[in-house]
Image: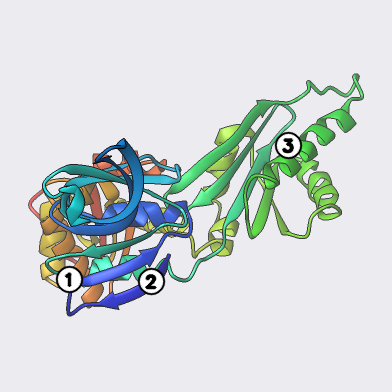
């Protein structure tokens, strides 16, 4: 995310979208009633020429936001409030298709400190990691975003047995798949994980062909289950702690341990977390992104602001992550507390 201009006297922030995670962050700060200004294409009637699609700048009052996780497009629908006078567009519906590389200006009645912090947190990018998990049977390759894990490739590997002697074919298939994937995505590091010795051989071969830092780790299985196991490992959490999903997993683990041993040190559900935030008791907070898209938006934003203003840690969890189902079962929002509080459970 590149912040091009911030004019809080006008409650205006103009940004440039630089990757798919930026689109997800925009989705969490946009809400019905905001004004969005951007360049777009619009079909208009021109005398003597019929309909033509021409470029123009429009301002719309937001009605609905559509976001497809891991896509490169965010759709913002609303009513046109400003545009070229000669086309008489005011009052008509329009949808901005915001893509990587686009610039948008957002004007709110009032920006909250939490909303601004979410935008600013994406100005400095952390690591982007390619995760590769395999065994003798299956391979998965994924990339780790703030919004979750995007699986890029999943396949069965050539059947291996000691008698067949086709280990070279197996290793070659893994190596080829990783190299092809790297032509399609950018990453800062690669994490190669497997049971047994496979990871060592694959990492060594890749290191001879690419100039990207490669780390190795052990998982009990390959495929998608191996990727999910890898994300939960302490070594990966320490390496990739800048990435939102990793930090969120660590907070959730801490929450669950306290819930079992010292339940007065955690809060879950909107009512409990709101009480804890009002008491300045929240040290760490996780909230599902869906909570910022429904009728609870104002209440949740107030909680986020209270927690951040008092130095607490806030992490927003994408509904596309494995962690989301656990959060939904706890009301969509949980907190680790600084001190004990009593709740009527």
Q: Position of residue 315 (x, y in %)?
A: 34, 60
| Cα–Cα span, label 1 and label 2 | 24 Å
Q: Residue at (73%, 59%) from the top-left corner? A: 212
In the rendered structure, which disc, 2 or 3, sits on the residue that comes first in sequence?
A: 2
Q: Residue at x 82, y 55 (%)?
A: 207
The number of callouts visible is 3
Q: Nearer the observer, disc 2 or disc 3? A: 2
In the image, taking residue 328 as reference, residue 80 lies left or right, namely left
Mark 1 vs 3, N-terminal side: 3
Q: Nearer the viewer, residue 259 or 277?
A: 277
Q: CA distance from mark 1 to mark 3?
A: 47 Å
Q: Which mark is residue 121?
A: none
Q: Residues within 10 Å of mark 2 (few under 14, many from 20)?
A: some
Q: Secondary structure at mark 1?
A: helix
Q: Which residue is mark 1?
A: 306
Instruction: Give the mark toward the camera: 1 or 3.
Output: 3
Q: Residues within 10 Å of mark 3 (few under 14, many from 20)?
A: some
Give the residue at mark 2: 3
| Quadrant of the rendered image containing residue 168 | top right
Residue lying at 37% horizontally and 39% vertically, measured from the top left: 68
Q: Give the residue pinned by disc 3.
A: 177
Circles 1 and 2, Cβ within 8 Å, touching? The answer is: no
Whether pointer 2 and pointer 3 mark residues with C-beta atoms closer than 8 Å, the reply is: no
Nearest the eye: 259 or 334: 334
Rendered position, 124 above or below 155: below
Q: Residue 199 placed where, x, y %?
A: 76, 45
- Going by the image, does 219 lie left or right of 165? left
Image coordinates for residue 64, horizontal then vertical, percent? 20, 43
Please indicate, yes or no, whether residue 63 appears anywhere in the rendered image: no
Alpha carbon of mark 2 to alpha carbon of mark 3: how far? 36 Å
Quadrant in which the N terminus appears: bottom left
């Amino acid at each position: 995310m590149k912040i091009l201009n911030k004019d809080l006297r006008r409650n205006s922030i103009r940004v440039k979208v630089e990757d798919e995670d930026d689109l997800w962050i925009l989705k969490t700060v946009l809400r019905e009633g905001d004004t969005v200004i951007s360049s777009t294409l619009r079909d208009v009637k021109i005398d003597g020429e019929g309909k033509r699609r021409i470029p123009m700048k429009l301002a719309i009052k937001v009605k609905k936001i559509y976001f497809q996780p891991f896509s490169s497009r965010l759709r913002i629908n609303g009513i046109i409030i400003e545009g070229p006078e000669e086309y008489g567009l005011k009052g008509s519906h329009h949808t901005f298709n915001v893509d990587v590389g686009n610039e948008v200006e957002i004007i709110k009645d009032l920006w909250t400190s939490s909303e601004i912090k979410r935008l600013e947190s994406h100005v400095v990018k952390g690591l982007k990691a390619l995760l590769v998990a395999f065994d003798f049977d299956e391979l998965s390759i994924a990339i780790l975003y703030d919004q979750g894990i995007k699986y890029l490739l999943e396949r069965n590997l050539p059947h291996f047995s000691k008698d067949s002697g086709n280990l070279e074919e197996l290793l070659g298939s893994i190596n080829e798949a990783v190299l092809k994937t790297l032509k399609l995505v950018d990453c800062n590091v690669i994490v190669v994980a497997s049971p047994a010795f496979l990871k060592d051989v694959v990492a060594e071969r890749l290191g001879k062909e690419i100039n990207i830092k490669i780390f190795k780790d052990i998982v009990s299985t390959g495929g998608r289950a191996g990727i999910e196991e890898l994300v939960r490992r302490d070594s990966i959490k320490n390496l990739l702690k800048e990435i939102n999903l990793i930090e969120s997993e660590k907070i959730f683990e801490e929450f669950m341990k306290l819930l079992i041993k010292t339940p007065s040190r955690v809060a879950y559900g909107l009512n409990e977390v709101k009480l804890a935030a009002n008491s300045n008791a929240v040290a760490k907070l996780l909230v599902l992104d869906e909570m910022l898209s429904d009728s609870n938006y104002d209440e949740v934003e107030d909680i986020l602001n209270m927690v951040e203003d008092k130095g607490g840690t806030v992490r927003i969890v994408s509904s596309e992550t494995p962690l989301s189902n656990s959060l939904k079962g706890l009301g969509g929002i949980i907190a680790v507390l600084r001190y004990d509080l009593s709740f009527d459970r």
